[in-house]
C-alpha cells in the first residue's frame, strides 16, 4: 500500500499547531489514478490541487475521491509549536506516524518535497525504521506538489486545518470522519507520549 504525507500549520490562539498527516490508500495504483483523474477531468484543472485555494465543488470532488479509494489517515497535531520549532514538531510527528504506517501495511510513502529540508525527513525516517528493526520495510520518495497522489494528503490536512481553526463550516472534515478517512487526531507536544482526541 502507498501513503502520501503533507503538513499544515494553522495559527491558533495559544500558538501554532503543526499538523503532519499521512493518508494511506487501500485501492491499487490504477484505481487511485483513475479516481484522481476524475477530480482533474471534472474540474478541467491544469494546476496542482491546493485545498486552501479551492472552491466547494473541487473540495467535494477530492473528498469523494478519498472515500472512493478507501483512504485512512494518521494525523499528528503538535501543539503548541514555537515559531522556531516547526522542524522539531515535524520530526516528532513523523516519529509517531511512521510506525502507524507500518502497522497499516504501507510499503511506500510519497512526501511533498521541501528541497533542502528533505534530508531532515530522511534522517528521521531512517532513525525510526532503525529503532523498529525494520530498515527496509518502507520505501519513501519526495515529489513536487504537481504529483496528484499528494493531493489526497493535502485535502485531509486542509480539512483538519479548517476544523482546528474552528471554521463554522467543517462539512468536509465531518464527511471524512464519518467515512473513516479521518480518525482520532493524535495530539503531541514537547512532553513524551501522544494524546488522542
Image: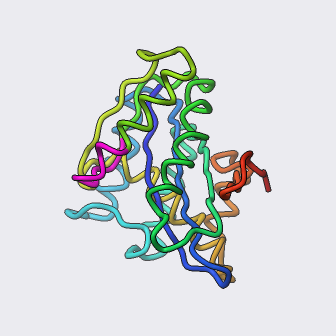
Judge by depth and name the residue closer to the eye, 179 or 131: 131
Tell me: residue 132, above or below residue 196: above
Residue name at image x 43 percent, y 74 percent: 52
Which range is magenta?
111-120
Looking at the image, is 6 positioned above or below residue 10?
above
Residue at coordinates 44% horizontally, 34% vertically from top-left?
Answer: 125
Q: In front here: 65 or 195?
A: 195
Q: Is residue 116 left or right of residue 129?
A: left
Quarter occupied by residue 97: top right
Q: Is residue 143 left or right of residue 165?
A: left
- The image position of residue 72, as x and y in percent, is 60, 40
Which part of the image, by quadrant, shows the C terminus?
A: bottom right
**Is residue 112 placed above or below 47 in the rendered structure?**
above
Residue in the image at 49% along x and 53% along y: 90
Q: Is residue 16 above or below residue 191?
A: below
Task: Residue 126: say if magenta.
Answer: no
Where residue 32 appears, as percent x and y from the top left, is 40, 37
Residue 160 in percent (x, y) is at: 60, 64
**Relative to 35, is 75 on the left or the right?**
right
Amino acid at each position: 500500500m502507498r501513503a502520501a504525507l503533507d503538513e499544515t500549520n494553522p495559527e491558533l490562539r495559544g500558538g501554532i499547531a503543526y499538523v503532519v498527516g499521512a493518508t494511506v490508500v487501500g485501492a491499487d495504483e490504477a484505481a487511485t489514478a483513475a479516481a484522481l483523474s476524475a477530480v482533474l477531468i471534472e474540474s478541467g484543472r491544469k494546476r496542482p490541487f491546493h485545498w486552501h485555494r479551492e472552491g466547494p465543488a473541487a473540495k467535494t470532488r477530492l473528498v469523494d475521491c478519498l472515500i472512493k479509494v478507501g483512504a485512512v489517515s494518521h494525523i499528528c497535531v503538535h501543539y503548541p509549536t514555537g515559531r522556531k520549532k516547526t522542524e522539531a514538531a515535524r520530526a516528532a510527528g513523523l516519529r509517531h506516524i511512521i510506525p502507524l504506517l507500518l502497522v497499516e501495511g504501507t510499503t511506500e510513502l510519497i512526501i511533498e518535497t521541501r528541497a533542502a529540508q528533505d534530508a531532515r525527513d530522511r534522517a528521521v525516517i531512517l532513525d525510526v525504521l532503525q529503532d523498529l528493526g525494520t530498515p527496509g520495510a518502507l520505501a519513501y520518495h519526495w515529489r513536487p506538489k504537481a504529483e496528484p497522489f499528494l493531493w489526497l494528503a493535502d485535502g485531509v490536512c486542509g480539512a483538519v486545518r479548517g476544523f482546528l481553526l474552528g471554521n463554522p463550516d467543517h462539512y468536509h472534515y465531518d464527511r471524512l470522519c464519518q467515512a473513516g478517512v479521518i480518525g482520532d487526531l493524535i495530539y503531541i507536544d514537547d512532553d513524551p507520549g501522544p494524546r488522542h482526541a
